[in-house]
Amino acid sequence: MARPGEFAAGAPEHAEAALRAALADLEGEPRCAECPNEADFFLYEPERVAKFVCWEHVSPISAVVEAAEGDGTVDRPLAVALSEEFS
């Protein structure tokens, strides 16, 4: 299992690759894993979290929205925005 921060240097690239794979496996539009709403974000942390969520279920406490440059650690899931509205 990945340790917190283990993939921090390449976190955005890993998250984008996981998002592409998750989208390829979908039939239709992504839906929130927590409610019936359309998904606005893809939460990702290697070997721990890979799910779609709406804006109501993404939280700055539980997700880093677009990893900070040079932060060096990712101990929370990365939240990748699915649209420009949340970028």
Image (tube, helix red, strand yellow):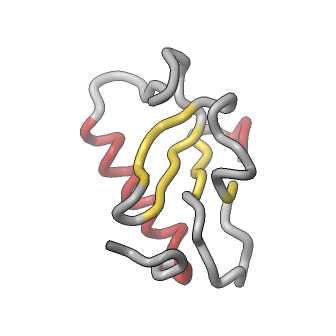
Number of numbered markers: 0
Q: Give how far across and how far down residue 13 sits, in percent.
A: 47, 69
Q: Quadrant of the N terminus?
A: bottom left
Outermost top residue: 36
Residue depicted at 65% across the width and 51% down the height: 62
Of 31 and 35, nearer the camera is 35
Q: Give how far across and how far down residue 84 sits, in percent.
A: 69, 41
Of 65 and 77, nearer the camera is 77
Position of 21 with respect to 72 (left or right) is left
Please tell me whether residue 30 is drawn above or below residue 78 in the rendered image: above
Residue depicted at 41% across the width and 50% down the height: 50
Residue depicted at 69% across the width and 55% down the height: 65
Please tell me whether residue 29 is drawn above or below residue 83 in the rendered image: above
Q: Give how far across and how far down residue 70 sits, in percent.
A: 71, 84
Please tell me whether residue 73 is drawn above or below residue 67 in the rendered image: below
Please tell me whether residue 65 is drawn above or below residue 10 in the rendered image: above
Q: Give how far across and how far down residue 72 sits, in percent.
A: 64, 84
Residue depicted at 52% across the width and 71% down the height: 11
Where residue 75 sits, quadrant-wise, is bottom right
